[in-house]
Image (cartoon, grey):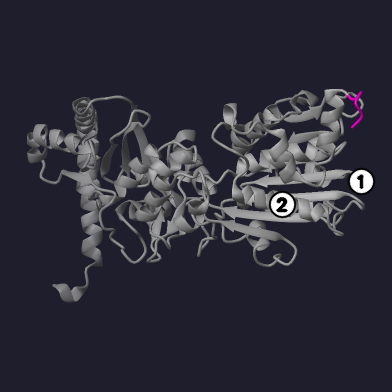
Amino acid sequence: MLASATPEQELIQDIGNFSADPLGYTRYAFPWLEGELEDAAGPRQWQREILSVIGEHLKSDSRFTPLELAVSSGHGIGKTALIAMVCSWAKDTCEDCRIVVTANTESQLATKTWPEICKWTRLAITSHWWNIGATTISVKEKAHERQWRIDRIPWSENNTEAFAGLHNKGKRIVVIYDEASAIADSIWEVTEGALTDEGTEIIWIAFGNPTKNAGRFRECFGRYKHRWRTCQIDSRGIEGTNKVQLDKWVADYGEDSDFVRVRVRGEFPRAGSTQFIAGDVVSAARNRKLAPEKYESHWKILICDVARFGDDQTIIGIRQGPKFTILDKLRELSTVQTANRVMQRMKEHDPRTTVIDGDGVGGGVVDYVREYMTAWFNANPARRLMEFHGGAAPNDAFMYFNYRANMWGAMRDWLATAQIPDDPELESDLTGPEYYFSAKNQIQLEKKEDMKKRGLASPDLGDTLAMSFCAYTQSKTQEETDRDKLAATNSIAERSLLQYKLTMERDSRLRRAEERRPAHWE
């Protein structure tokens, strides 16, 4: 460097020297052991290995052959940070570099992946080179701002143009998939077809938890392993991960369960692991309108899922055969207040069975209702109060891990012909939980606390509906249905007319039955 060179010119030359050395760049460009990075002396070991793979490729004779990297991992290893480091290196060290980043969902992209990329861009010694926007990071140099950039692009199977136009001949293209298991195969295919420029540095990296046992991310480790560089990472072997939480998952689900394979070991599940209830099934149930005669002949089941934490809801609902109705969404009620609301609803709707979640604080609600509704139950011995325990043994121990999973299984079957409220929160609850297979190959539903770690809410509405399936109630007899119709009629004249009509219908049914009786019964 000439003595007359300015600090900025020295910086430009230093950064340019890292064009084929992303590991060297990350060590140079970021303020390790300071500020936000005060606890880190540099990239983690696995991150250094991935950065070295990229550098070795760019220094080899195959530099202009696309580098395809697939990283399958458990939780908490720092993959989003590495995505940001790669983006920062790629754009800083190559003029007119073009980078496209996508993720499994727009939410993941907007709230996790993109903020991390922006954070590391600000941390870098080159931060003053860049304009950071909501969906784009572009160079400040006006002559290059349109082609020298990072773009945050959500994918859509109906609009693949953004991935079809990935051309940057003679320069550098970087494509990054975050949570790649859930990105549609069609997007992979379009991306693959676009990365064909000659004399161009092309780097395609797919990161993710291996949640699905099929699809293009899975095929990177199987069918296409001959051209993809792959890496599978167990979270327990990575510095800085929450070992206490990881060990808890192993204890809860089992070392060889699909949950631990996916979320801890970074291995693909033995069976296809995905959401337990499909979105189209729930959507159809939201839009279905059943005729009253389809459900009015069924006894009502009142259900209450009692909230345990401040951000959860207490839900009270009614299921009557194929129809579910939400009565209350409540927060921050005491045990006594919750019990009083349940008793109020019992008197209003006269359910044949009342089901209350008996775990945790719900046990107090059960005891209170049982004590103060004794006379109400005694007045009709057919009425029942049931205490639900999700961790209890399932009815079908061959298929399900516990009682909660068993009831969700029954609910999933029921939804195919049911009517549920047109409530987006209920739909989110029903489609949110994932399922895995236990070490004994039983279906095991994802726990509420683990859903929260994925950024989802506790499925309180879904659990409420599922609880109703522990109560087996037969349909009303014709006599019981007639009695209910009479009880609902206020006018004396109308009641007399209805009584006459119901009596005639009953006599007609008896005559038809008599006519069908075989002669040898005489």
Which residue matches tag 2? 52
Q: Which mark is on residue 169?
A: 1
Residue drawn at x 34%, y 67% is 398
The reply to whether the C-beta atoms of the residues labelled 2 and 1 are less than 8 Å apart is no
Judge left or right: residue 238 versus residue 195. Answer: left
Residue 28, position as x, y percentages in the image = 72, 36
Horizontally, is 425 left or right of 206 in the view?
A: left
Question: For residue 448, which quarter of the picture?
Answer: top left
* Helix, strand or loop for disc 1: loop
N-term-proximal mark, 2 vs 1: 2
Q: Amino acid at mark 1?
A: Lys
Foreground: 34 or 190?
Answer: 34
Outermost residue to the front? 3
| 264 or 320: nearer the viewer | 264
Along the line of sight, the residue nearer the viewer: 172 or 8:
8
* Residue 464 spot, x, y in % from top left: 33, 41
Q: Amino acid at mark 2?
A: Ser
- The range drawn in magenta is 1-5
Q: Is residue 258 magenta?
A: no
Relative to 395, say whether 90 is above or below: above
